[in-house]
Amino acid sequence: MTLVVPVRMATHDRVIQTTSRELTDSSVKLATQQRPRALELMAVRLYLPDAQLPAGVMGRVRPEQPEQGELWLDLLDTAGSTGERIRALSSRLGPHRAGVRYPVSVAASIERGGERIAARATDVSSGGAFLRCESDLEPGALLTMQLLMSDHDDPLEVGARVVHRIRAGERQAPWTEPGVGVQFIDGDDEFRARIDRFLRKLRAA
């Protein structure tokens, strides 16, 4: 199923915080620019949207990989609780779901190839955001983005992947605006902690 959730992968010498693109009870497809070694074992933590603690499981990097910016991990030992949670989500959510979106109005910027574009995030989830902006970024484009979530804190920077685009003049509904939907990729533990705190404040408001 298509399910965008935060995913943390770790080995003895590095940590990768990113998001999923597809998830089954035996594998996960990730959005990431990093390339672990083929068959490398990773400790994986899946932040599933079922109000429970993150699901922990071991993952093995597939030898054959898709296009740049994506990575397949085979999940090991999912016959127990982790596999049951994924299967329960699949039956409850259906084939296409992302994280819960919260409406916001947050100053942002995106950068690709040395070009910086001013933007404004109009919704945010644990896995991504919609950025209102004028740009020619196509789906699949990889970029760096910053979110100014507070006047008192430094901007929150993270990698991102464009998953869809609305051009000026395209009006599927009266409230749509030009911009891009992005998926967070390759953050660190500080990024995950800050975005989770921000979302908790939105839920409590």
Image (spheres, rainbow, N blue to C red):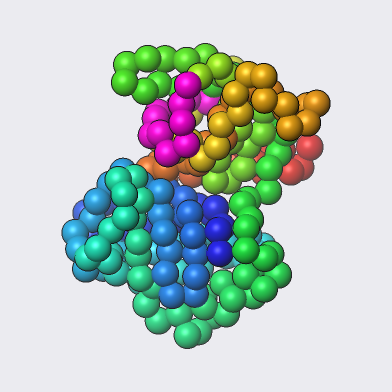
The answer to whether one can see residue 105 in this image is no
Tell me: residue 172, above or below residue 153.
below
**For this view, does 59 lie left or right of residue 194?**
left
x 63%, y 50%: residue: 99
> Where on the picture, by quarter, is residue 33?
top left
Is residue 144 part of the magenta span, yes or no? yes
In the image, residue 24 sits, relative to residue 18, either above or below, namely: below
Horizontal and vertical percent position of residue 176: 72, 27
Depth check, front residue: 135 or 31: 135
Q: Nearer the viewer, residue 92 or 77?
A: 92
Image point 56% across, 31% down: which residue? 165
Q: In this view, does 163 lie above or below 80?
A: above
Residue in the picture at 50% in, 64% down: 23
Residue 51 shows in this picture: yes
Task: Return the x and y of residue 203 as percentages of the image width and height.
Answer: 74, 43
Q: 183 left or right of 9?
A: right
Q: Which residue lies furthest to the bottom in this view?
A: 79
Q: Quadrant of residue 45?
A: bottom left
- The image quarter in which residue 149 lies: top right
Magenta span includes 141: yes
Q: Where is residue 36 in the image (x, y as percent from the top left)?
A: 23, 55
Left or right: 166 with respect to 159? right
The residue furthest left is 37
Task: Please state which of residues 166 and 1 is positioned toward the viewer in this rendering.
Answer: 166
- Percent from the top left, x then y, of residue 13? 21, 54
What residue span does the magenta drawing correspond to? 136-148
The C terminus: image quadrant = top right
Please state, as top left, top right, bottom left or bottom right, where the N terminus lies in the image.
bottom right
